[in-house]
Image (cartoon, rainbow, N blue to C red):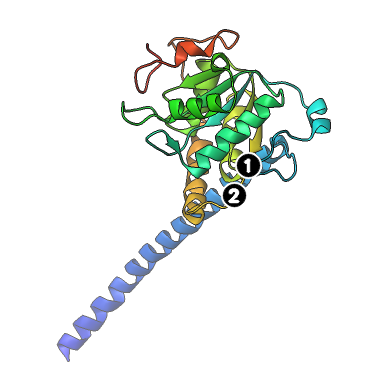
Amino acid sequence: MRKYIISNGSTRKKRPVLFNIAAIFAGAVVLTALSAALMNVIVVSSSAPHIISYGKISPDTELYDSELIKETPKYDCIIILGAKVTGTRLSNILEDRTKAGILAYKDGMSDRIIMSGDHGKKDYDEVNAMREYAERLGVSTDDIFLDHAGFSTYESIYRAKNVFGAKRVLIITQKYHLYRAVFIARRLGLDADGISSDFREYGGMPMFEVREIIARCKDFLITLLPERKYDGDVYVLSGSGTVTHDMQPGSHEA
């Protein structure tokens, strides 16, 4: 009987502690989820007005609607954000981004393209693969600037501003990613618009969408911090982009 009472009393003492821990944990989960949802709403809603829609376009599109082009001002540059390559072969996502950027270039949206991606290793080079693809489709090599250290969306946009001196930019990527890219650009003080490059269905999109929800939160918080000072080399977009082509991986050093 005595053992039963001790056991029962011990249980009564532990139950409130475990309950409190569970309540705190549940509250933290709910608060985190609400905060993430709010940050995602802010990113998407603030960027949506700056996404240019040309209606339905496909990989075979040669030009956008000429009437819309007349109303669309020119940009300092078109920024094409990098994605996976296999050797020199572009993934479907990156091929469509590059194609959409080329279409905007041919439409006269800008006569300069910044291709920003991962060239962190000698044997992995997103930016030159993009450049070679664009050159095969008629883009002048002088008009292509390469950012070899675009390891993240934030880095790509930050470097477009501070390495290349861009002020008014047109960003090209898939729509799920475009909201964040435009949000970052505008928070960094760039006059930024975007065009989505969703020419087809892509495998793994549910995973991409989940990752993007987390990435929006990360970059929302990063943009609240003071922008760090950039003391590296600066490339003038009015010059030739060839000076950025033959560079060491992950840098802007020849």
Label 2 with label 1: CB-CB less than 8 Å: yes
At x 44% / y 62%, what residue is drawn? 26
**Residue 58: percent from left, percent from top:** 66, 44
Q: Amino acid at mark 2?
A: Arg
User: Residue most toward the bottom?
Assistant: 1
Give the quadrant of the N terminus: bottom left
**Residue 192: percent from left, percent from top:** 65, 27
For disc 2, the neighbor class at 10 Å (few under 14, some 14 to 19, many from 20) is: few
Q: Does 245 sit above or below residue 218? A: above
Q: Which mark is residue 152?
A: none
- Upstream in sequence: badge 2 or badge 1: 1
Q: Choose between 195 and 227: the one closer to the eye.
A: 195
Q: Is residue 226 visible?
A: no
> Left of 140 or right of it: where is 222?
left
Q: Does 123 sit above or below residue 140? A: below
Q: Choose between 201 and 150: the one closer to the eye.
A: 201
> Left of 247 or right of it: where is 205?
right
**Residue 227: percent from left, percent from top:** 50, 22
Give the quadrant of the C terminus: top left
**Residue 109: percent from left, percent from top:** 70, 24
Q: Which mark is residue 59?
A: 1
Q: Which is more foreground, mark 2 or mark 1?
A: 1
Q: Which residue is mark 2?
A: 200
At x 51% / y 38%, what residue is drawn? 94
